[in-house]
Amino acid sequence: MKQADKKKKWLSLPLGLAVGALNGLFGAGGGMVAVPMLRWLGLESDESHATSMAVIFPLAIASGLIYLHAGQFQISDALPYLPGGLLGAVCGAWLLPRLKTLWLHRIFGVVILFSAGRLLLQ
Amino acid sequence: MNWVGIALASFFGAVLSALGMGGGGILLIYLTVYLGVQQQPAQGINLVFFIPVAVVAICIHAKHKLIRWRVVLPCVALGLLGVWGGSRIALALDSHLLSKLFGGFLLVIGIRELFTKGKKDNKSSEKTE
């Protein structure tokens, strides 16, 4: 069992690479790899969802700094979105231990597919 | 400025992010599809938006003892290398092409979301149900 756990921990490194690569390439989507990766490492479902935030947080800072340094945007461009974002963060974190997320996944999937269609066809 | 759209996109994006459901894409989609912001600046804005959202969510999750800090460091270690590589590619690509690639990525994610089994019950959720 201990050898299997050690092997899993080593395999988390290339998976972490994939999380970072998605974060850098698209500015989003790292969580899609992080959550199942953490589940695979043996974390409970709620722990995986919560811990993924802690994984992506430093990666988002690094990516953001790279984009900022490249002159792609200004920090002030993100300010209008912060009030809603902070409120949403509190609500989402409060909901995590209380919510069955199946229907959220379905709704999210429909929204994502609609948006994918718009992006691919425009 | 469309304050309703901004409020809705940022609120729901943050809710889904805090739930660990990858809601970071919601704001990015709003910026690119509905506001017509170019892909690279939109990605940058989304990343900066995520940072304070993550701080709040992480503090609350940590208070609920849901974060396993011991696995964070190894995941982040190589993740930073991935960030460097991914962002270099993104900044070198034509914005239109990057937008299409992102659209393809969303297609994969969307299909996966429709067929996912959702969050499995665990000990923490059993207490409140």
Image: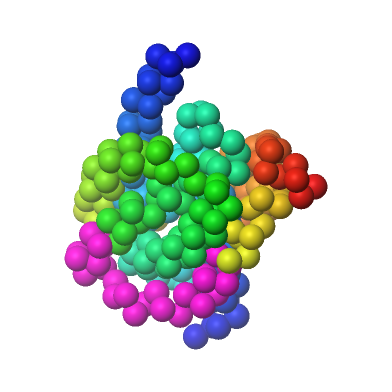
Q: Nearer the viewer, residue B62 or A24?
A: B62
Q: Nearer the viewer, residue A14 or B66?
A: B66
Image location (x, y in percent) of residue A115: 55, 57
Magenta span: predominant SS is helix
Residue at coordinates 27% horizontally, 56% vertically from top-left? A62
Q: Is residue B119 above or below residue A71?
A: above
Residue A85 is a magenta residue: yes
State the extent of the magenta-drawn residues as a range: A65-89
For the point 40% across and 39% down, which residue is it? B70
Q: Could you say where residue B121 lies in the image, as x and y percent from the top left?
A: 71, 38
Residue in the image at 23% along x and 59% along y:
A66
Residue ranking furthest to the bottom: B1
Say if residue B18 shows up in the picture.
no
x and y percent of residue B104 in the render? 46, 45
* Residue A118 position (above or below residue A25): below
> Is residue B119 magenta-colored?
no
